[in-house]
Image: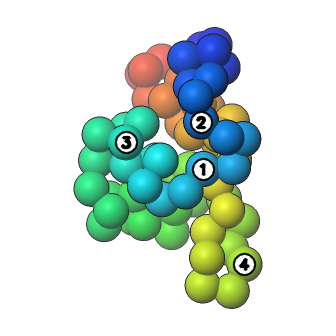
Amino acid sequence: MSKEIFAEYDEILSIEDVMEILHIGKNSVYSLLKSNEIRNIRVGKRYIVPKQSVINFIAAITEN
């Protein structure tokens, strides 16, 4: 999957960015992050979500 699809997004995504990209709600995003289905880094109460992690997640679910 090409990174150009998400070129308008920064390399580090907010929860709102992930919601927009995947067309899901906030609770679903937090569930994916907590289960580590989308790789992330937890800093205090905040999640750092690399754009590549979301791209990898989409690639993995579309392969199945």
Residue bearing the label numbered 2: 9
Kindly state the secondary structure of the residue where label 4 is placed: strand
Residue bearing the label numbered 3: 20
Residue bearing the label numbered 4: 43
First in sequence, mark 4 or 1: give its number: 1
What kind of residue is marked 4?
Val
Marks 4 and 1, how far apart in space? 14 Å
Q: Which mark is residue 60?
A: none
Crowding near the residue tagged with mark 3, few <14, some 14–19, many ≥20 C-alpha atoms within 10 Å:
few
Q: Are marks 2 and 1 in contact (CB under 8 Å)?
A: yes
Q: Which mark is residue 13?
A: 1
Q: Residue at x 64, y 54 (%)?
A: 49
Crowding near the residue tagged with mark 1, few <14, some 14–19, many ≥20 C-alpha atoms within 10 Å:
some
Q: Residue at x 67, y 40 (%)?
A: 10
What kind of residue is marked 3?
Glu
In which quadrant of the rendered image does the N terminus lie?
A: top right
- Colour convention: rainbow
Q: Is residue 16 left or right of residue 39?
A: left
Q: Are marks 2 and 4 in contact (CB under 8 Å)?
A: no
Kindly state the secondary structure of the residue where label 3 is placed: helix
